[in-house]
Amino acid sequence: MSSSVRVNNSDVAGVQQEIARLADLPQVGSACAWFRAGESQLAQWQLEVASIPAPPFGEAARGEWLKKRFRELGLEEVHADEVGNIFGILPGPGKYGVTLSAHIDTVFPAGTPLNVRQQADRLYGPGVSDNGAGVAALLAIAAALQSGGISPSAPILFIGNVGEEGEGDLRGMRHIFSTSRWRDLIRYSLVIDGAGSDTIVAEALGSRRFEVIVRGPGGHSWSDFGAPNPILILARTLHAFAQTPVPASPKTTFNVGVIRGGTSVNSIPESASMRVDIRSTSMVEMERLEASLRQALESAIGEETRLSARRSPPNRPSSGLSYEVVPIGNRPAGELNPNARIVKVIRAVDAHLGNVAQIQRASTDANIPMSLGREAIAIGGGGAGGGAHTLQEWFDCSGRELGLKRILLTVLALAGVAE
Ligand SMILES: [Zn+2]
């Protein structure tokens, strides 16, 4: 929760009239009717997509499946780009477009037993909600727009993107926004991630992750005593780094999650490494913490070199130390302008639907457009879900219609409807 995205209520009233007008259009009514009529088709799609493995960097089969669905639903220019993102366009006359995207990758490594199944209104299986619910929502919106015969005033770009989870590091979105065609076309980005309709991610939680590796000459604990010790260097680094002050606002955190090194109790280690995670909504704070980590490491190296020289016999030079700080993750932080239209629109849609949703800060595909100063939010695909990133993941279809109407009205308000 955060208070930094504040919306002027009088603006919302204006946008709310626009939402009410949109919702009253007969073609929007028939699009919404598809959500109820199409629920069993949606559940079927969701089971199918979750049954196709899509580990990070292995999303191609799922991408092929999605391309077929996009074509069946009448989207144009259906294609995959160089990194495997799948595109389909509902054309419109405007110069700027709106994206509706859902990541197609999962956290589950290749070979994970998927065992996707349905029992009454519930779907079970890894990835069924994150992001089976998002992919199903994309298809639902495309199907509803087709069924209602709606022509948007601006192009709507449907994207099933790769590389959201873990070491994918947002590579799919990053690629889209580094491609000039899309970068210049996209005005608003609506990211659908997981289930639910009670959240609005309007702040991008950034993260930087590093593997710190220290190498030394190693040796026998007794006969080579004095040689510099990489584990001692990491210990000194951590002691100093952990004292770095962090602000409560913007909330900024650090963690050392993995530490490895050494061979045996009577060996001076040849190497030691650790993995460090830094998070904030502020790029400045993340940079400050990274600088503090590097500085702590450099002084630990200096200190160990000095002490090692002191404890080594005079005839044996104590050297051979080296270190690396390898970036293993980099997600940019960002915040929306408090007057961003996309927040007014989703707020007004929620008011129209009587839906209660909280503004949240998280790390999603929306980080990329937000860090570039673009208007973007991430919301759920409706229904309810749980057990994300576990083999016990589930999705409950009941009430999905509300979440889908919410997405439809938001997209249409952002793109406009040609009448
Ligand atoms: Zn997700």
Image (spheres, rainbow, N blue to C red):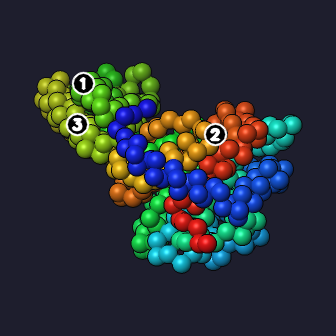
Q: What residue would you read off at disc 3?
A: 292
- Circles 3, 2 touching at the beta carbon (< 8 Å): no
What's the residue at 51%, 47% (across, down)?
348
Q: Eyeballing the image, is 92 above or below 27?
A: below
Which mark is drawn over residue 110? none
Which amino acid, by three-letter code, is at mark 2? Answer: Gly
Q: Residue furthest toward the right?
A: 120
Left or right of 74, for residue 352: left
How far apart marks 1 and 2 lie (CA) works out to 39 Å
Q: Is residue 289 visible?
A: yes
Question: Which secondary structure, mark 1?
Answer: loop
The quadrant of the rendering that contains the C terminus is bottom right
Residue 409 image point, x, y percent? 60, 55
Q: Earlier in the sequence, mark 3 or mark 1?
A: 1
| Above or below for 182 versus 240 | below
Q: Amino acid at mark 3?
A: Ser
Image point (69%, 36%), residue name: 384
Where residue 222 appears, x then y in whole percent?
31, 21
Residue 194 seen: no
Query: Which mark is nearer the camera, 3 or 2?
Result: 2
Q: Position of residue 119 (x, y in %)?
A: 86, 36
The residue labelled by disc 1 is: 243
Residue type for callout 1: Gln
C-alpha span from label 3 to label 2: 39 Å
Q: What residue is at 16 percent from the left and 26 percent from the top?
A: 307
The residue carrying pointer 1 sits among few (fewer than 14), some (14 to 19) or many (20 or more) residues within 10 Å by Cα, namely few
Q: Is mark 1 within 8 Å of ligand 1?
A: no
The residue at which mark 2 appears reads as: 196
Q: Compare marks 1 and 2 and give the one earlier in the sequence.
A: 2
186 and 21: which is toward the camera: 21
Q: Position of residue 303 (x, y in %)?
A: 17, 30
SS for callout 2 = loop
